[in-house]
Amino acid sequence: MAIYNPKSLKAEEFINDEEIQETLAYAEANKANLALIDEILEKARPKPTATGCACAGLTHREASVLLACEDPDKIKKMYEIAEEIKLAFYGNRIVIFAPLYLSNYCVNGCLYCPYHLKNKHISRKKLTQDEVRAEVIALQDMGHKRLAIESGEDPVNNPIEYILDCINTIYSVHHKNGDIRRVNVNIAATTVENYRRLKDAGIGTYILFQETYHKKSYEELHPTGPKHNYDYHTEAMDRAMEGGIDDVGLGVLFGLEMYKYEFAGLIMHAEHLEAVHGVGPHTISVPRVKHADDIDPSAFDNGIDDETFAKITACIRLAVPYTGMIISTRESEEVRTKLLRLGISQVSGGSRTSVGGYTETERPHDTEQFDVSDQRSLDEVVRWLMEHGHIPSFCTACYRAGRTGDRFMSLCKNGQILNCCHPNALMTLSEYLEDYAAPETKEAGYALVEQELKRIPRDKVREVAAQNIQEIRQSNRRDFRF
């Protein structure tokens, strides 16, 4: 039997089933232990330091106790502390990105994804480099600066060389005032050498969803194809970091397996990365199973309601306070509005989950990976964020300034990252307002910019940011950053 060891490089030791089962039993036994819950909540709360504040985070056992707790007052307190943590380290900024689907050819048999090999009635499509270029221009015309590229796993149709060519094409497109400044990559688990090639291509974050940490369920949900190999998939982040990729993004597909099991596994994976590499995940995503061609979410009996989903999000924020959290257009405006207060720091906007979807006038559905619940335009998403007191940010400065991995985390943990991120958010928002925003969005946006400039504590930073924003408004100069 495998023994739990967070420093091990073996999947069954750092994501250990026996440890998870014991954790769930411990959480169930203590879910009404209000004294213990108060201790855990106090540990999670941000504490003032000489440079700002700091958070201790929570172990997977402590966080699992909070997730199991059913006391309304304690849940309310969880939500309050989650918002405190989010504001302490990420401020009121929300980073915006869009997915770009390159190909839906796939050799895997994943039971929850319409791209699975046996689905013969979905249209299969792979973008040419000219089509990639056209998609990028369409995204630039919306105002996007950050993409997450997505592709099915198919060594013939989507080899690593194709992915690298697409990244090169994306970075090469300079259209009007538009540039894609950061490309994150969500592709299948691969080799250390291929991760080195992705790093050399200039990617930002490597993202790979575990789908489920329950090995038996994982193998049943992935009956055929290379993704069936649980260990190879689960150990991918270690190979990515060995290949030089500083920033990696975790996530499970909530609804496939019991959510408490998945939650414990997810926090254990974050603990493992911290123990082995000295830095935890750069991001954690929280997708839920959604309807798609050939996929009925009701076929999976582990679905979670909106309130449970909110509690999961808040508990992740308490457990891993310095990690970015992502919610996509899988979720409705209503759900996204609530979760923004509970720790989310990145959202997608104006997304299309079909191959070649951005160049189509009407949203195509024949190659979608999942139904998009939030179908608003990017401009509508930007205005919505501002109406709720958030700063829409298109910033990519940390990635290009080398503030990645442990360098980013050290700045985040001591509170210094806000000195860069706040003015960078205002400058990139100003770019959006000047080049792409509707008149009412532009008016509201500049009112927000003026208000937020006053909140920059350092006089020199405030002065430079204001000068740069004035330059953006009066000329075609772009890409100012701290």
Image (cartoon, grey):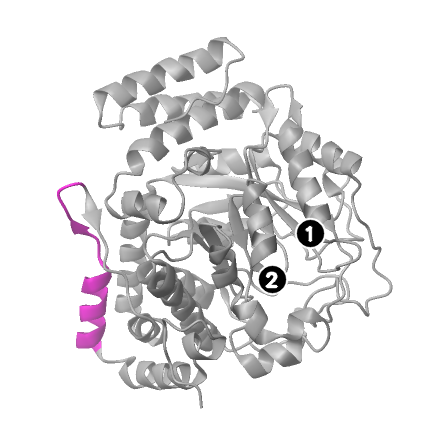
What residue appears at the point 68 percent right and 57 percent down from the top-left corner?
370
Q: Position of residue 449 (x, y in %)?
A: 38, 24
Magenta region, residue range: 34-51
Q: Position of residue 300 (x, y in %)?
A: 63, 76
**In the shown orientation, is residue 456 left or right of residue 133?**
left
> Residue 189: which disc?
2
Q: Is disc 1 placed on a helix, strand or loop?
A: helix
Above or below residue 277? Residue 296 is below
Above or below residue 145? Residue 286 is below
- Residue labelled with disc 1: 160
- Pointer 1 local density, CA inside 10 Å: few below 14, some 14–19, many at least 20: some
> Residue 379: which disc?
none
76 and 264: which one is in front?
Answer: 264
Tell me, yes or no, whether the two marked residues, 1 and 2, touch with CB atoms within 8 Å: no
Q: Residue furthest bottom?
A: 1
Q: Position of residue 472 (x, y in %)?
A: 47, 15
User: Which image quadrant is residue 391 in?
Assistant: top left
Instruction: Examine the structure image and report whether residue 41 is included in the region drawn in magenta.
Output: yes
Instruction: Examine the structure image and report whether residue 422 is included in the region drawn in magenta.
Output: no
331 and 225: which one is in front?
Answer: 225
Q: Residue furthest left?
A: 50
Type of amino acid under label 1: Ile
What residue appears at the point 22 percent right and 25 percent down from the top-left corner?
458
Q: Earlier in the sequence, mark 1 or mark 2?
A: 1
Q: Residue furthest right?
A: 121
What residue appears at the point 60 percent right and 25 percent down from the top-left corner?
178
Taking the image as drawn, is residue 242 in sight? yes
Instruction: Assign the N terminus to one quadrant of the image.
Output: bottom left
Q: Spatial distance from mark 1 to mark 2, Cα to Cα? A: 11 Å
- Pointer 2 local density, CA inside 10 Å: few below 14, some 14–19, many at least 20: many
What residue appears at the point 20 percent right and 75 percent down from the top-left corner?
36
Instruction: Assign the C terminus to one quadrant of the image.
Output: top left
